[in-house]
């Protein structure tokens, strides 16, 4: 004679399908392996948004095309930010151009990499005492790599590309996550130049939550200004309280 | 000198009092005149001598003289000659009349000079901000404007001391 048994259908999120308590470490280890494979694949196929803001129109075409042929490294040019991996900032950035660069950068899908090419992006270069150009690119965008030189030769650019490929392969090129983790810092620097009503149509706060990169530095006094000026399409209401990571997970 | 000068130009220059001109090259003429006579000169040059092209208006800030120098560059396609008319206006109040009614492209040049030097042109169609982005400071092309001071105030520097630089410094 058989007796019917009822099985509890309440599922515990900390257990797997075999009702075994999941080891968090084990899960992250699996994730690490998958990330490692994904990084390796990713580093072999990169698309550059060649945003030639200042100079570099002499050095970049031979680097990309048949003379030095960066396609053998898996790096190709792409004309739109939404299909690109690398944002190549060549030369000086005026304050006016920086606005457009930030708009392009925020449209790129993660993971994305920024290369600051030429001395101008490092410390202003030969425009160090100009009122119209920015001096340090990493104050406004997270930069993965700088290539010093005015301009760097195609060989140096190739070397830099190889270094970036190596960094991506080893999982070290994570500067794009900084933008979401420290969005308040970057937005504050942008607001210092463009005025307190500066905002972009991209919903960076929601993206930070999507990528699970929301941290206590994502929000702050500068993002609080967004509630006043940002469009209705971004996360509303923009949280004023700095949320803890545990609260977000719930 | 005056033999080389085209006849139309000579008749124009004779009508303007206190006008000094200097031939700087075969196709280049530097003209200095009083500020209030400039609109009359431009009118005569355009109407009588065929100087149809106002190629630029440039401005120079002279801190010792406390004056702005305005230079009007005019080109004639008939005589094939460039006339640069130099006038001086006092820095205070820094106002001058627009030549927009004579040359329409002057609107852009005057708007640019207003933004970069703070000279106000009466009668110009628009004196609104032009090229500078979110600019709250004084006109940046003035000699009294310290670009380095502005940069130090607005931007920061980063340390740059790579290994190769220290090796170069130790050799010296």
Image: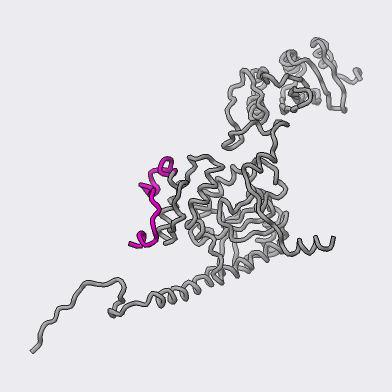
Locate residue B18, reporting x and y percent: 82, 12
Q: Is residue A232 magenta?
A: yes
- Left of A198 or right of it: where is B127? right
Residue A172: image quadrant is bottom right
Of A178 and B97, nearer the camera is: A178
Q: Is residue A164 above or below residue B124?
A: below
**Toward the viewer: B158 or B116?**
B158
| Magenta-span inclusion, residue B155 | no
**Is residue B102 at least partly visible in the picture?**
no
Quadrant of image for the N terminus of chain B: top right
Q: Pick whichever, B34 or A21, lies toward us.
A: A21
| Residue drawn at point x = 41 percent, y = 76 percent | A25
From the top left corner, tell me how far across and down residue A59 is, in percent.
70, 56
How far from the left and from the top, in percent, is residue A79? Answer: 56, 54
> Is residue B148 something one can see in this rendering?
yes
Q: Position of residue A141 (x, y in %)?
A: 56, 53
Work out whether A52 lies above or below A69. Answer: above
Q: Is most of the magenta stretch helix, strand or loop? A: loop
Q: Relative to the observer, which residue lies in front, A229 or A233?
A: A229
User: Which residue is found at the position 51% from the left and 51% from the top?
Assistant: A185
Q: Give the residues in magenta.
A: A225-250
Task: Choose top left, top right, bottom left or bottom right for residue A231.
Answer: top left
Q: Is residue B67 left or right of residue A205?
A: right
Q: Quadrant of the C terminus of chain B?
A: bottom right
Name of the residue lying farthest toward the left: A1
The chosen color scheme is one colour
* B138 up-or-down from A107: above or below: above
């Amino acid at each position: 004679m058989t007796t019917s048994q009822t099985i509890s259908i309440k599922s515990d999120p900390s257990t797997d399908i075999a009702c075994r308590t999941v080891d968090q470490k084990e899960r992250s280890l699996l994730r690490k392996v998958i990330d490692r494979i994904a990084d390796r694949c990713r580093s072999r196929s990169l698309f550059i948004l060649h945003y030639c803001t200042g100079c570099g129109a002499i050095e970049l075409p031979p680097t990309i095309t048949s003379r030095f042929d960066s396609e053998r490294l898996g790096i190709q040019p792409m004309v739109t930010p939404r299909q690109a991996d690398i944002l190549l900032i060549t030369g000086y950035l005026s304050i006016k151009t920086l606005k457009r660069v930030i708009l392009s950068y925020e449209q790129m899908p993660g993971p994305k990499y920024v290369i600051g090419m030429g001395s101008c992006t490092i410390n202003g270069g030969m425009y160090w005492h100009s009122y119209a150009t920015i001096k340090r690119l990493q104050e406004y965008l997270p930069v993965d790599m700088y290539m010093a030189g005015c301009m760097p030769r195609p060989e140096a650019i190739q070397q830099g590309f190889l270094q970036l490929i190596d960094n991506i392969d080893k999982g070290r090129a994570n500067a794009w996550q900084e933008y979401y983790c420290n969005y308040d810092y970057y937005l504050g620097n942008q607001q210092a130049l463009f005025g307190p009503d500066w905002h972009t149509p991209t919903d960076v706060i929601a993206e930070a939550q999507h990528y699970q990169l929301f941290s206590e530095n994502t929000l702050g006094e500068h993002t609080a200004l967004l509630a006043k000026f940002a469009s209705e399409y971004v996360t509303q209401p923009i949280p004023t309280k700095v949320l803890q990571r545990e609260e977000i997970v719930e | 000198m005056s033999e080389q000068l085209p006849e139309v130009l000579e008749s124009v220059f004779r009508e303007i009092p206190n006008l000094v001109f200097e031939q700087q090259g075969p196709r280049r003429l530097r003209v200095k005149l009083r500020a209030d006579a400039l609109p009359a000169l431009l009118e005569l040059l355009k109407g009588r001598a065929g100087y149809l092209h106002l190629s630029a208006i440039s401005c120079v800030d002279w801190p010792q003289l406390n004056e702005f120098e305005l230079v009007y560059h005019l080109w004639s396609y008939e005589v094939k000659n460039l006339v640069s008319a130099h006038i001086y206006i006092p820095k205070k109040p820094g106002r001058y009349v627009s030549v927009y009614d004579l040359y329409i492209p002057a609107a852009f040049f005057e708007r640019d000079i207003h933004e970069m030097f703070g000279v106000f042109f009466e009668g110009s169609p628009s004196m609104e901000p032009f090229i500078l982005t979110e600019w709250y400071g004084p006109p940046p092309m003035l000699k009294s404007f310290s670009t380095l001071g502005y940069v130090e105030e607005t931007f920061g520097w980063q340390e740059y001391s790579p290994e190769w630089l220290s090796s170069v410094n130790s050799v010296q």
